[in-house]
């Protein structure tokens, strides 16, 4: 296939599209709220009213406002409907046709939740049918891949990514261009590309959404990476908990292969690239890159010491490039618009946009893509609409590797470095908002329970340390602890941080350390209530009956 | 109600009618053929172990020792390695699950929104703890670390279908027919 043919596929798709497209979200969140029945009813309604040549119902990916699903959007009419039930279908089609009012609640597309977003990774999410490659192509998809193969050398591609300033979105924030350059420099033998779609951080679902809503964007990014570093084979390691993402990826790979966009001699060039899917089996530690590699090789997901880095010796001992889903999903846009355009977005050291999963005690739950450097306050109060009947107490970022940021620091701009300065981190982009009813000691215990259960057990500080920290926290919560226990807990944190082998153990103490730093009073309150037999203030009770 | 410390009883396995397996497993159980096919498709590569285990769990419901042995032989791996991998990953289960499953998400977003209470109520009403199966083999209650539906937290997966914003009473309503019907 050449560019002409690619454009022809896109043009044909455009011609076949009806003037009014009714977008109905079919991603996990909305499916859970019955959006598939809704979609069927919308389709029936179009048919019954004889509107099939004007109106087209499209099952699309996530629109971001998942907390108010199922969502239906009609771009031609600038309308969004929220919490739509299957019974609302007829009235929505009627509204389009006759200008009547639909029975479903209308959403406000000018609300900051939408207005403040800048969509690069999610530019077509919620607008195209993820199960049809033609829709992706009609939106300009795979042109970047064509461009790199035909108009750029591998070195030029690496250079472009380097200049864009893109940093890895999987948590560490390592410069993507530098990683690509390292793998590209390795001797030209077998090399591999791995897409890390393990997304183990609880509270984060942006990778899931990207895979479900626009799988081709990820495949295209991987293929471009393959061309840039000299790899002919790639693996996507997806967690088994994401069945819909797996289905759509399989479908997308099949479609791309059929068109000659993946496989051998892509776009009639000498470049071959095939992509395989590997399904995880529920182990958080497998998100760590060396553990992930061992899992693809069919073994236990035990991390190993680095160096050697996967870039030098990864999958089956070959140089391997590992990037996160969102990192790959940025690539095609960077190639299309140029590195300079990308580097102009964001802050000095954190370029581009980041998707955050905004959840917890907040009015507007869902996914937002915003330029780096936006403040936490803008995200939580303006976009998120704040805490329903209450006040923000803290925001947890970075999952089990991160920490809790108190409400007093809401004016912090969000980027890799500023969050680390606060003792938290960006991680994969989970943001869980907590209100006054949440016990911070309880939160620390919650994360320690997580790490205790997810440690791979290879090194003692992490295996035994997480258990002991969990016990210490439980003792504090049960009001049986003394100041001595608190001191011991802090020592344990430092020891586990300093002596663990991989990122899991090294960062496991973070939620404890950050809550100790910002909410020490709560710890002390619980301890004092032991010593004097006093009850702590109301808000220091654990939020839920968990444990 | 049911607080016996005995291991939960196995739900009736679907019986395969035919008995004409030539090679495969001596029992003639057709499900071993599925394993044969999966291993063959992967050219008996040892790195296909996790995929084969997935397939095995899908067809058998859980990984009994016989199945692990069969896979070890097929991929020419020591049983200790197969066992080591099967026990490392949370999704592989060496015990049978109930005919119906209810997975409560205990991820951060769900936790903050009260999934702990949903679980506690479920445990109270069913008389079993997370990770356990009712005595009649009908219902298993399990927990997950986040199923990626945090926007609609708290999330619960009933027999593979995700439900969002689930309250404790809704969860109980949902599982009621699954264990009440069959309790003596
Ligand atoms: C315990 C642990 C879990 C991790 N989980 C993930 C994950 O779920 N997804 C991910 O992309 N990266 C995860 N990472 C980071 C990866 O090891 C790796 O740095 C990342 O995939 C590199 O991609 P990037 O440069 O595009 O960010 C994890 C790291 C650790 C230590
Ligand atoms: S730090 Fe923990 S998870 Fe990492 S290798 Fe050691 S025991 Fe395993
Ligand atoms: S899942 Fe439907 S809007 Fe996100
Ligand atoms: S925390 Fe429950 S679905 Fe993510």
Image: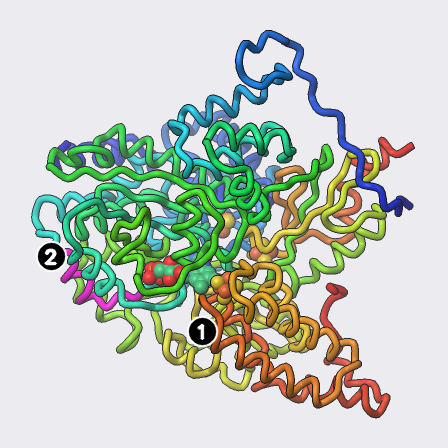
Q: Nearer the viewer, residue A536 or A384?
A: A536
At numbered mark 1, what does the secondary structure look like: helix, strand or loop?
Answer: loop
Residue to which mark 2 is pinned: A155
Crowd tier of the residue under label 1, counting other residues whose Cα lies within 10 Å: few below 14, some 14–19, many 20 or above = many
Q: Residue A425 got which mark?
A: 1
Pick out the residue farthest to the top.
Answer: B20
Pick out the residue farthest to the bottom.
Answer: A532
Residue drawn at x 37%, y 78% is A417
| One can see residue B79 in this view | yes
Q: Position of residue A307 (x, y in %)?
A: 32, 65
Crowd tier of the residue under label 2, counting other residues whose Cα lies within 10 Å: few below 14, some 14–19, many 20 or above = some
Q: Is residue A278 left or right of residue A240?
A: left
Q: Position of residue A303 (x, y in %)?
A: 44, 58
Query: Residue A163 in magenta?
Result: yes
In this rendering, the answer to whether A452 lies above or below B24 is below
Query: Residue A468 in magenta?
Result: no
User: Which stretch appears magenta?
Assistant: A157-167
């Amino acid at each position: 296939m050449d560019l002409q043919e690619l454009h022809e596929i896109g043009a044909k798709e455009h011609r076949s599209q009806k003037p009014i497209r009714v977008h109905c979200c079919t991603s996990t969140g909305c499916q859970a709220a019955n959006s598939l029945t809704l979609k069927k009813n919308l389709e029936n309604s179009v048919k019954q009213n004889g509107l099939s040549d004007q109106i087209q119902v499209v099952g699309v990916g996530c629109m971001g406002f998942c907390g108010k699903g199922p969502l239906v959007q009609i771009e031609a009419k600038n309308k969004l409907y929220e919490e739509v039930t299957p019974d609302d279908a007829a009235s929505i089609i009627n509204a389009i046709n006759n200008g009547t009012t639909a029975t479903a609640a209308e959403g406000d597309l000018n609300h900051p939740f939408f207005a403040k977003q800048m969509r690069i990774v999610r530019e077509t999410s919620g607008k195209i049918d993820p199960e049809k490659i033609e829709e992706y192509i009609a939106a300009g998809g795979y042109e970047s891949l064509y461009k790199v193969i035909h108009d750029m050398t591998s070195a030029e591609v690496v250079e472009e990514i380097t200049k864009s300033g893109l940093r890895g979105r999987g948590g560490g924030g390592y410069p993507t261009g530098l990683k690509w350059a390292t793998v590209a420099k390795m001797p030209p033998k077998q090399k591999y590309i791995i897409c890390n779609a393990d997304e183990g951080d609880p509270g984060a679902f942006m990778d899931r959404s990207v895979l479900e809503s626009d799988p081709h964007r990820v495949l295209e990014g991987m293929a471009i990476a393959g061309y840039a570093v000299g790899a002919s084979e790639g693996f996507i390691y997806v967690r088994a908990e994401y069945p819909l993402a797996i289905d759509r990826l399989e479908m997308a790979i099949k479609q791309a292969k059929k068109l000659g966009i993946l496989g051998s001699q892509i776009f009639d060039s000498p470049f071959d690239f095939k992509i395989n899917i590997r399904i995880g089996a529920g182990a958080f530690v497998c998100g760590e890159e060396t553990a992930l590699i061992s899992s693809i090789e069919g073994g236990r997901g035990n991390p190993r010491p680095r160096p050697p880095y996967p870039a030098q010796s990864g999958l089956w001992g070959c140089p391997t490039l590992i990037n996160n889903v969102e990192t790959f999903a940025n690539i095609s846009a960077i190639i299309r618009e140029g590195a300079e355009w990308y580097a102009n977005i964001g802050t000095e050291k954190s370029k581009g946009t980041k998707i955050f999963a905004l959840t917890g005690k907040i009015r507007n739950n869902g996914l937002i893509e915003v330029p780096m450097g936006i403040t936490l306050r803008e995200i939580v109060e303006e976009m998120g609409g704040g805490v329903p009947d209450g006040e923000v107490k803290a925001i947890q970022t970075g999952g089990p590797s991160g920490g809790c940021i108190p409400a007093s620091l809401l004016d912090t701009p969000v980027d890799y470095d500023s969050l680390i300065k606060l003792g938290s981190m960006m991680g994969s982009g989970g943001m869980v908002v907590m209100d006054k009813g949440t016990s911070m000691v309880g939160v620390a215990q919650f994360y320690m329970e997580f790490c205790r259960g997810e440690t791979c057990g290879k090194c003692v500080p992490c295996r035994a340390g997480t258990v002991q920290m969990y016990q210490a926290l439980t003792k504090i919560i049960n009001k049986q602890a003394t100041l001595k226990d608190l001191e011991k807990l802090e020592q344990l944190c430092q020891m586990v941080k300093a002596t663990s082998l991989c990122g899991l153990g090294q960062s496991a103490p973070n939620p404890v350390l950050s809550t100790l730093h910002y909410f020490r009073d709560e710890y002390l309150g619980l301890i004092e209530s032991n010593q004097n037999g006093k009850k702590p203030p109301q808000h220091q009770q654990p939020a839920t009956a968990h444990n | 109600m049911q607080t016996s410390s005995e291991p939960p009883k196995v739900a009736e396995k679907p019986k395969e009618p035919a008995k004409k397996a030539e090679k495969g497993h001596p029992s003639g159980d057709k499900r071993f053929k599925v394993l044969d096919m999966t291993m063959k498709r992967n050219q008996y590569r040892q790195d296909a172990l996790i995929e084969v285990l997935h397939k095995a769990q899908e067809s058998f419901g859980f990984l009994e020792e016989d199945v692990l042995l069969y896979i070890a032989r097929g991929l020419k791996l020591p049983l200790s390695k197969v066992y080591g991998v099967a026990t490392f990953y949370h999704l592989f289960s060496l015990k049978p699950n109930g005919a119906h499953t209810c997975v409560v998400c205990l991820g951060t977003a769900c936790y903050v929104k009260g999934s702990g209470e949903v679980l506690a109520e479920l445990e109270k009403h069913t008389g079993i703890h997370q990770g356990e199966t009712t005595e009649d083999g009908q219902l298993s209650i399990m927990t997950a670390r986040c199923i990626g539906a945090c926007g609609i937290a708290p999330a619960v997966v009933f027999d593979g279908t995700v439900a969002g914003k689930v309250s404790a009473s809704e969860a109980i309503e949902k599982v009621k027919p699954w264990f009440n019907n069959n309790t003596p």
